[in-house]
Image (cartoon, grey):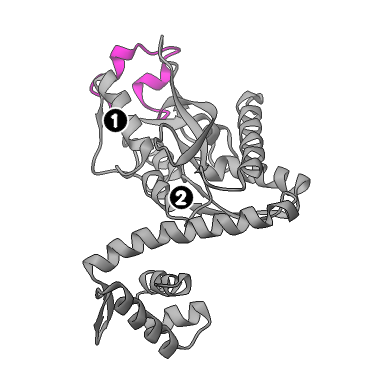
Amino acid sequence: MPTLRQFEYLVALADHGHFGRAAAALHVAQPTLSQQLRQLEERLGAVLVDRRSSGIALTPIGRDVVGKVRAILAEVQDVKRIAARSAERMAGTFRLGVTPTLGPYLLPEVIARLHREYPDMKLHIRDGIPDEQVQHLRNGALDLLLTPLPVAGDDIEIEPLFREPLSVVAPPDHPLAAKVAVQQSELAGERFLSLDPRHHYHRQVRDICDGFGAVVLKDYEGISLDSVRQMVASGIALALLPELYLRSEAGGERSIVRLDVIDWAAYRSIGLIWRRSSPAAEMFRVVAAAIGDAAREAMTRPLG
């Protein structure tokens, strides 16, 4: 039967794409790694790695096996944590995935608060695309994910945290910026900026613009909320920006104007998710409470 160590060798090779780098990451000799992978292939009766002079690549069956193996290793890690849980006291390092449309504008306060109360618990923050990070969570590359909802799956625990308002913003010299209030019909035909289509944020902006009869620009997709705000300020188009970004020191309302759209409100729902099998669920609920409290406080603080 294959061993867990052989599975770890295979995943390391998949991650690094090179025998030498994978061996160095695992602190083993390269011949040992190569020999163990040969034994794994023999035991499985399949070629997992295409060895080339220019490097290596996983075979199609190798890619399928790696996907399954990642999930197995994540379950094993959870079992180890269950065994050690009695000795835990809100301690450990956890990998927290977060969308870049939220993390920089909320997590600094959350991390400071958690560090004061639970100094032995560490959070390793990883920005990424929410849809991709859900898969990273499932295969064990992440322990927690702070993400826009909805997210579905019987294998994950979902803790809804808060609803964050979205606001329409415009450049100061836009005709609508001078109005005390704006009718929804006045947004018909307006152009809006967004992010990469893989972001949940992009899909929500598209749906809202469909309701307005507005257009989402395809040639001016930002790489961050800051880039979207700066493009709005330069007069390219309007945008929808989240409340925590608009209230943050890192973001803010510099060089843009919020529009008061009559009889209209939009929100995005934010939640924290983790694998249902995780033994650290109690700690994760503490993290969830801290994030929810920090977000609500930030959104009710007087502006300025």
Name which quarter of the figure residue 196 lies in. Answer: top left
For marks 1 and 2, the one nearer the N-term is 2
Task: Determine the secondary structure under disc 1.
Answer: helix
User: Badge 2: few (under 14), some or many (20 or more) residues near its Cα, within 10 Å?
Assistant: many
Residue 9: image location, x then y, percent: 43, 75
Name which quarter of the figure residue 285 lies in. Answer: top right
Residue 199: image location, x then y, percent: 36, 42
Q: Which of 252/36 is in front?
A: 36
Task: Compute the Cα span from label 1 to label 2.
Answer: 27 Å
Q: Does the segment drawn in magenta span residue 246?
A: no
Which residue position is annotated with label 2?
137
**Direction from residue 186 to residue 25 in the image, left or right:** right
Q: Which of 112/139 is in front?
A: 139
**Vertical arrangement, residue 201 with respect to residue 25, above or below:** above
Residue at the location (57% across, 56% down)? 79
Give the residue type that dot 2 points to.
Leu
Quadrant holding the C terminus: top right
Residue 37: image location, x then y, percent: 36, 80
User: Badge 1: few (under 14), some or many (20 or more) residues near its Cα, within 10 Å?
Assistant: many
Task: Determine the secondary structure under disc 2.
Answer: helix
Q: What range of the chain is rendered magenta?
A: 169-192
Residue 130: image location, x then y, percent: 41, 44
Give the residue type that dot 1 points to.
Arg
Which residue position is annotated with label 1?
206
